Image: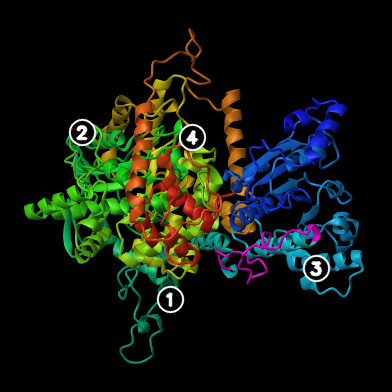
Amino acid sequence: MLSAIEDGEFSEAELDKLRKQWAGGRSSESPFSNPHSLRRVAPVIGITGTGGAGKSSVTDELMNRFLSSFPHMRMAVVSVDPTRRRTGGALLGDRIRMNSLRSERIYMRSMATRRQNVATNAVLKDCIAYLKSLGFDLIIVETAGIGQSDSEIVDLVDFPMYVMTSDYGAASQLEKIDMLDFAELVVLNKYDKRGAEDALRDVRKQWKRNRVAFQTPDADVPVYPTIASQFNDPGISWMFANLCRLLREKLHLPAEKWTPDLDTTLKEPRATVLIPGARVRYLAEIAEQGRGINRRIETEAETASRAQSYWQSLHDLGDPALPRALDLYAADALLPPQAGEGAISVDRSLLTLRQRYQDAVQSLSSEALKLLREWPSRLKAATDEVNEYEVRGKTISIENYRESLSHQKIPKIAAPKFRSWGELLTFLQKENLPGSYPYTGGVYPYRRTGEDPIRMFAGEGTPERTNRRFHYLSLGQPAARLSTAFDSVTLYGEDPAPRPDIYGKIGNSGVNIPTLDDMKKLYSGFDLCAPTTSVSMTINGPAPIILAMFMNTAIDQQVEKYLKADADRWNEAQKKLDELFAGRERPRYSGDLPAGNDGLGLGLLGVTGDQMVDAETYARIKAETLKTVRGTVQADILKEDQAQNTCIFSTEFALRMMGDIQQYFVDNGVRNFYSVSISGYHIAEAGANPISQLAFTLSNGFTIVEYYLARGMKIDDFAPNLSFFFSNGMDPEYTVIGRVARRIWARAMRERYGANERSQMMKYHIQTSGRSLHAQEIQFNDIRTTLQALYALFDNCNSLHTNAYDEAITTPTEESVRRAVAIQMIINKELGLNFNENPWQGSFAVEYLTDIVEEAVYKEFEAISERGGVLGAMDTMYQRGKIQEESLYYEHKKHDGSLPLVGVNTFLPKEHGGEIATEIELIRSTEEEKDQQITNVRAWQASRNGLAPEGETDHAHSTALEEHAEAEVHDGHGLAYLQKAARDRRNVFVALVEAVKTHSLGQISHALYDVGGEYRRNM
């Protein structure tokens, strides 16, 4: 009907007839009729304001509060966007900002103005009249952005509101704003911006002046400051309470039905401060400090060279009092001899040389002197046949050479042979040998023996299918390094369901993991507490929930091992399981176990460890597991906002949960698991060049450090739990991305934060570039991947994933994955130069690249700092905009051929120009697998939800339930304690560790939306 009205399909006579019908009241056949209606004729609120004032965010926050305060209210929203005069098109994008639209109680319609220079549609009055006839309880009309003299909305609605910000210019401009005369309520949004308090004062004055109400107290003036972008903003809540009051007064609405039960103790918005104001220049200060260190190194190198020149001259002159190199003269050797019997004559020039040598040595810092004095012994250790050193009281013996087929000794560490003290000092302070500060050459003295840095990415279909791929990749390997890809259903915190927007995505391009049982199946057969097992999980938005599942999986594995260690214990456990599942089917692993899977983790499907052992035993096993388990969860919400977009919770709440995870790690002694993988890979995949990738990633890392410090954590308690993840492409800067990252991180950790050596050591994972894989001449992709892997391995990355050639088209097959693994194995086991573990060190080109990339990163730090740090830059979408510009630049050069890509835009075969059909096996989840996951999650909910503590979960914007009886459990009954933990600002992760024992991913995500806020997307 609305489309017909908008498209002019009715004649004026027909419209007149329809208007009379609409005016007669709601249609009895309306699908929106509401027996609990709050009023027969729905009030109409009109929300207007300047473009960019935040009208959509204000509207969304109001709808959230209407939904939660009035459980039976049904609303219609009409959002009007301007039609562009030149093209005739309209964006119609306001709905992307409105998270409340997931509720079945809200109907929304976007429409264009279809005319110029106005903020409403010509047929908007008829559209409102039609909606009023349908039985809605409230209608909200949001107009397009307006100018100073526009007030057309006033004539169309019952209650006009005006949304503005402090960016209106001089106070005299307020005289020109027509809506300040007609608005029943004024919202001063974005109250966290500079000058907002002064603006509030001036707008209130103008309101009084317009109405000649100078005696009205400020508190009674309907001008309310808000920060609509902030979840659960007290300013919005106070404005909402007054909106309801003013609606009751103006439209004579019943107080008992239009009075919300809200806590309005706080009346003004409070901006969430994640980084204290005194530290907001952290990135600029790190850049200043880094440059200062480089200048100091140059100065000290010159001083060391002078000292060496003096010492060598004194040595050549045969000075009898000459000390050992870098030692000091005795004090009396620097003074002229006293006249008298027995006095030894000393040449004045020799005395001057002694004094200048002494001054030069004393000008060097204690650290510089220590480095130079210890170098001969370190050089000997690196060049002897065998090097011995101690780690945690244990003597480690390493052979320093490998013999080639030509019987040549290839050094594992190629040490420099500088004769100049200045050059040596520059090397030691800028580079140093691997394993020594600033770790430019690597964080460990030698690479791990007996274990290659191979970590392959896998995830497709059901947990069982991915488990089989993991065992295929790990079979015969000395260590299992598993990297997990999740499907988009899991990435966005949803359960598998028949819904059209979910069903087709279940198990595609990743594994579907909605429950704890699925997690147990996924990693079954791998002892998650074994020192040879390490798991990485690439998930961000719902990462705290998935991590809680993982920790429970590891704990339950150890409970299972404890029970199986004694036959009687295991028999008793089986009896208990039979009792628990009496009359119903036990969950099971679907299909045959793959080679290498001994079934560990499958013994307690459908139950949790705390049900099978006494509380004391469970607590002991849990504590031991947390101290032992190894792995990484990505959980980097900052790069999600900047690049990848799988944000589901509000940024503030997501960061808070990241901090809760780390605090949980500190409290429980979790030392071997990385609580976050600060990721540049997705920034690069979105289009960033290597310098932006590195700068944004490091800046995100330092932001997390500053936030954790502001929460009261100590740097050495959490810094070792931070890891990094970079992409390696073909650009020259990728040669040094790890070197620069390690140097900047180590210096900042030591000099700015006073962190210990373990915290200074940046560990990072590399994945070869996905965007460098091309569908044309697809076989060439392995060549690119090999070169990128060389970059990574020569730069001493801590782990590496090599992409399969067919990932340009599909999830990799077993054949393509085997080739991808072989790339690493051939480099590690066959390539002769890789016998050496620091091949980049000593290269003029590599050193030059290192220095210019370091400086480029510092410049980017300053650009971000000028915008208020990482979080401030995110508000203005600086990072996203820069990534888009760099992506466009790449695509333009790729398109015009100025960036040669072999097989894509150059070196094309004559017969088909690079466009040829290639037979590739497409990996997709089957209908059977999708249905299996839906059935399993419903069975889990039906079986486990009832075991949660009493307490109804709040659901202000619950989604429509599926037309299946089994879906009725989806409201997540029993998660009130989780929501209370979030509201009380207690550690949410502690509650999540319990919540995943009884509820599914989607249930938990939806419960948290109501207390932490849902991510509001930008366009």
- Compute the Cα span from label 2 to label 1: 76 Å
- Compute the Cα span from label 2 to label 4: 32 Å
Residue 1012's spot in the image, x, y percent? Answer: 52, 57
- Compute the Cα span from label 3 to label 1: 79 Å
The mark that comes first in sequence, 2 or 4, is: 4
Residue 423's spot in the image, x, y percent? Answer: 41, 56
Query: For numbered disc 1, what is the local secondary structure?
Result: helix
Identify the residue under disc 4: 499
Mark 2 or 1: in front is: 2
Q: Tell me where residue 466 sits by quadrant.
A: top left
The mark that comes first in sequence, 4 or 1, is: 1
Image disc number at residue 594: 2
Amino acid type of the residue that numbered disc 4 sits on in the rendered structure: Arg
Is residue 463 shown left or right of residue 864?
A: left
Is residue 208 shown left or right of residue 145?
A: right
| In front of the other: 109 or 304 | 109
Amino acid type of the residue that numbered disc 3 sits on in the rendered structure: Val
Q: Tell me where residue 255 sits by quadrant.
A: bottom right
Disc 4 packing (10 Å; few <14; some 14–19; many ≥20): few
Question: Residue furthest toward the top?
Answer: 911
| In front of the other: 421 or 724 | 724
- Mark 2 vs 4: CB contact within 8 A: no
Image quarter (top left, top right, bottom left or bottom right) of the N terminus? top right
The mark that comes first in sequence, 3 or 4, is: 3
Disc 1 packing (10 Å; few <14; some 14–19; many ≥20): some
Image disc number at residue 221: 3
Query: For numbered disc 3, what is the local secondary structure?
Result: loop
Residue 205's spot in the image, x, y percent? Answer: 85, 68
Q: Tell me where residue 342 sits by quadrant.
A: bottom left
Identify the colour scheme used.
Answer: rainbow
Query: For numbered disc 4, what is the local secondary structure?
Result: loop
